[in-house]
Image (cartoon, rainbow, N blue to C red):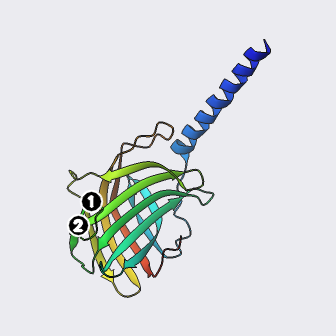
Amino acid sequence: MKNWCFVVIIISIFSCAKDEIQTQIDEEKLFSGNQMYGEAEGLRNGELWKASTYALYIEEPYNYYGLFFRTFSIEGFKREDLVFNEIFDDTSKQLIDNKWEDLDGFVGSLYSRLESDGDLLTSVYKLDNEHSQNCFELTQIDSMTISGTFSAKFILETENITYPYPATVEFEDVIFSMQILEEDPE
């Protein structure tokens, strides 16, 4: 009888833990963080989205910018990571691609979700190349700052049953302004 009670208690504990994880993802509010180096604001899946941002200049032989967008949990742990690479000093509209190769002529992109204390990569999304609104535009660039807009739609590439994220994530009309840093602050 003691063994039976023990099994029931263990099952109850694990059932509660799974419910907590589900609730955390469904109800977790993501925060933009301290926005020390820049900020972004737009829509993600039709709802207001804000993020902390910064840019890195990738020197020779590439000579382009990498742009980073991050959101955090209420405790300050990283939850979303959106990165664009191969951004040149060009203020015209540029198409975004899901390629992540240096100097292939396209703005590359990656979007991922993180859990735990911000270092557990739980889901990776790839750009939906069928979406006609995947574009990036710099509106201002100088030696210290970059500003611009983007819209992009991503499709879940790695499904994770423990962390049930949406199948698609669409960013619309995101406006950003960020500092250009010499090294990654993380």
x, y percent for residue 102: 28, 69
Q: Callout 2, which amino acid?
A: Phe
Q: CA distance from mark 2 to mark 1?
A: 8 Å
For the residue pair 92 and 122, the one nearer the viewer reads as 122
Do the numbered discs 2 and 1 sit on residues whose CB atoms are within 8 Å?
yes
For the residue pair 173 and 58, the one nearer the viewer reads as 58
User: Residue 137's mark?
Assistant: none
Specify the quadrant of the image occupied by residue 100: bottom left
Instruction: Left or right? Give the position of 44 relative to 22.
Output: left
Tell me the element at label 1.
loop
Extreme residue in the front direction: 61
Residue at point 33%, 68% (across, down)? 85
User: Residue 99's mark?
Assistant: 1
For the residue pair 88 and 44, the one nearer the viewer reads as 88
Q: Earlier in the sequence, mark 2 or mark 1?
A: 1
Q: Callout 1, which amino acid?
A: Lys
x, y percent for residue 116: 59, 50
For the residue pair 49 and 109, the one nearer the viewer reads as 109
Specify the quadrant of the image occupied by residue 14: top right
Q: On the rendered image, what quadrant is the N terminus found in?
A: top right
Specify the quadrant of the image occupied by residue 75: bottom right
Judge the density around disc 1: few (<14), some (14-19), many (≥20) Cα neighbours within 10 Å: some
x, y percent for residue 144: 41, 86
Instruction: Left or right? Give the position of 139 relative to 159.
Output: left
Extreme residue in the right direction: 2
Q: Which residue position is annotated with label 2?
A: 106
Residue at point 45%, 40% (across, down)? 160
Residue at point 24%, 79% (across, down)? 90
